[in-house]
Image: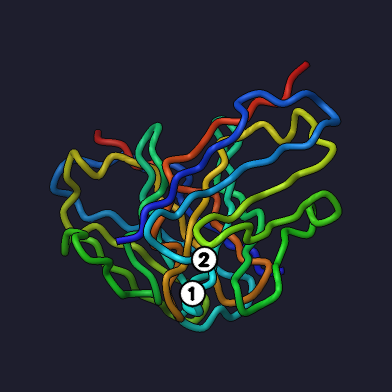
């Protein structure tokens, strides 16, 4: 099974800061890596799939990248509306799996 | 744009069977390009994949649930989950979701339905 190790588990930053969330896969997932945003009481929403493909309507301050089995979600300039929990997700191999989540707060 | 809507009981007794339905108005679950899934989230915890089914492929299940789980396409525009012998550990918000094309992740989700297992 492919384990997804996400860090940090919580993150506190100021509005305008550049924020980076990392997810490491225990084996290759090729390009099949996605990021979701989940706000309290709501369903997750897809931000990015295939490592860096931004979903329609997602602000361009969000971006995704990869280096081997390490994947990164970057928010270039944190906004108040970005307060949420973010999850990475590999859908390369069954069983598909999610990272443990990163809760992003405003300092 | 696809929309998904979960329905089912909010409360289930221990050892009983949980049945949930996901309606997909205006779309067909037999479409070649869709992979239908269930994901759950226990209170205060992260996301757990339950299983995925498509019209043209086998069902894939979370190994930890496999012996109690069935996901099936039960009409032209809905799919369902059946989880037998539930315990308190199955208490969670249950989401249905879909991959709407090859290479896509779960790009559409239902609003979620809370299921509590309690006597």
Q: Which residue is mark 1?
A: B31
Against A17, residue B45 (above or below) is above
- Quadrant into which the C terminus of chain A falls: top left
> Could you tell whether B67 is left or right of A70 in the image?
right
Is residue A107 or residue A28 the one in the foreground? A28
Q: Name the disc covering residue B29, or none.
A: 2
Against B34, residue B61 (above or below) is above
Q: Residue at x 25, y 35 (%)?
A: A106
Q: Secondary structure at mark 1?
A: loop
Q: Secondary structure at mark 2?
A: loop
Q: Name the disc covering residue A5, or none.
A: none
Asked if marks 1 and 2 fall on the same chain, the answer is yes
The image shows residue A82 at horizontal and vertical percentages of 24, 44
Where is residue A74, by image quadrant? bottom left
Q: Residue at x 70, y 68 (%)?
A: B59
> Could you tell whether B35 is left or right of A77 in the image?
right
Q: Are marks 1 and 2 in contact (CB under 8 Å)?
A: yes
Q: Residue at x 40, y 44 (%)?
A: A85
Where is residue B25, by image quadrant? bottom left
The image shows residue B69 at horizontal and vertical percentages of 77, 52
């Amino acid at each position: 099974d492919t384990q997804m190790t996400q860090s940090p588990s919580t993150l506190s930053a100021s509005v305008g800061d550049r924020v980076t969330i990392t997810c490491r896969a225990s084996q290759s997932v090729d390009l099949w890596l996605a990021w979701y945003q989940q706000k309290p009481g709501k369903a997750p929403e897809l931000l990015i799939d295939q490592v860096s493909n931004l979903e329609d309507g997602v602000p361009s301050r969000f971006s995704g990248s990869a280096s081997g089995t390490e994947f990164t979600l970057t928010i270039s300039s944190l906004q108040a509306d970005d307060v949420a929990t973010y999850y990475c997700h590999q859908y390369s191999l069954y069983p598909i799996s999610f990272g443990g989540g990163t809760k992003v707060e405003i300092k | 744009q696809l929309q998904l809507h979960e329905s089912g009981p909010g409360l289930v007794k221990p050892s009983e069977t949980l049945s949930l339905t996901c309606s997909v108005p205006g779309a067909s679950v037999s479409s070649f390009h869709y992979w239908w899934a269930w994901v759950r989230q226990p209170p205060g915890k992260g996301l757990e994949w339950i299983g995925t089914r498509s019209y043209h492929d086998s069902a894939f299940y979370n190994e930890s649930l496999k012996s109690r789980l069935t996901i099936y396409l039960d009409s032209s525009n809905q799919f369902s989950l059946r989880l037998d012998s539930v315990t308190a550990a199955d208490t969670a918000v249950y989401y249905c979701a879909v991959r709407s094309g090859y290479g896509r992740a779960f790009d559409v989700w239902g609003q979620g339905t809370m299921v509590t297992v309690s006597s």
